[in-house]
Amino acid sequence: MRYLVLSIALFSFLLSASAANSLGDAMTPVKDETKKKGAASAFEFNSKDPIYITSDWMEFDQNKSTITYKGRVVTVQGDMTIRSEILTADYTPDMKQIKQIVAEGKVNATQGDRVATGDKVVFDDTAKTVTLTGSPIMRQGNNQISGSRVIYFVEKDRAVVEGDGKVRVQATIFPDELKKQDKGETAPSN
């Protein structure tokens, strides 16, 4: 019964607007740019659709205040799917609130024509950030941006793509596709 309650708590955290509304705007063409108001957020969790998590294994550790899913973890909500090898939720000691969710190992998030990949994504409810690391690449249609780290500031609706001195921020932008996206048209996919 406790596992079911914790799974429901994990789902509730993922649904909360303050937890992680987005994994960032996949097509921010500059290093740091505020998204347009009214634009659809990429990889947005919503409060309407249920979240389904499947894995090969799950462990609840009350001493560490964690619940961990391992092995081919698939998290689905509406048209969004996040795949990883491990998904861990860290709770407050009283087990009433989730502080952080971490997806690790070949993370792949898809929603429509948006795809984000990397080795690790951290949804931090305390800092109100979503951070993608480990060779992160974000695509929308043919547009792509990459760097060493992508940070999305949830409350500020702002994304930053960083280089680390070895890895530089790289963007490939097709202006015609961006114009179509602004108008609500579907970009062609290859």
Image: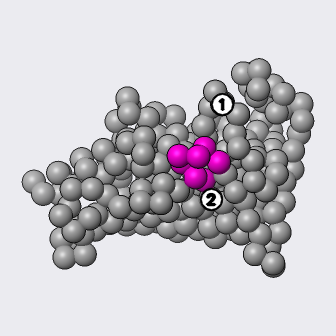
Badge 2 amino acid: Ile
Judged from the image, the secondary structure of the residue bearing numbered disc 2 is strand
- For the magenta stretch, what is the residue range? 152-158
Pick whichever, 17 or 69, lies toward us: 17
Quarter of the rendering containing residue 106: bottom right
Task: Assess disc 1: are there few (<14), some (14-19) or many (≥20) residues with their C-alpha within 10 Å of its C-alpha.
Answer: few
Q: Is residue 43 left or right of residue 92?
A: right
Quarter of the rendering containing residue 163: bottom right
Residue depicted at 81% across the width and 79% down the height: 166
What color scheme is it? one colour
Residue 87 position within the rendered picture, expressed as x and y whole percent measured from the top left: 40, 62
Res 37 label: 1
Q: Are marks 2 and 1 in contact (CB under 8 Å)?
A: no
Q: Is residue 85 left or right of residue 186?
A: left
Residue 49 position within the rendered picture, expressed as x and y whole percent measured from the top left: 38, 31
114 to 87, vertically: above or below:
above
Residue depicted at 83% across the width and 69% down the height: 168
Residue 59 position within the rendered picture, expressed as x and y whole percent measured from the top left: 25, 68
Residue depicted at 57% across the width and 61% down the height: 131
* Residue corresponding to mark 2: 151
Q: Is residue 45 left or right of residue 23?
A: left
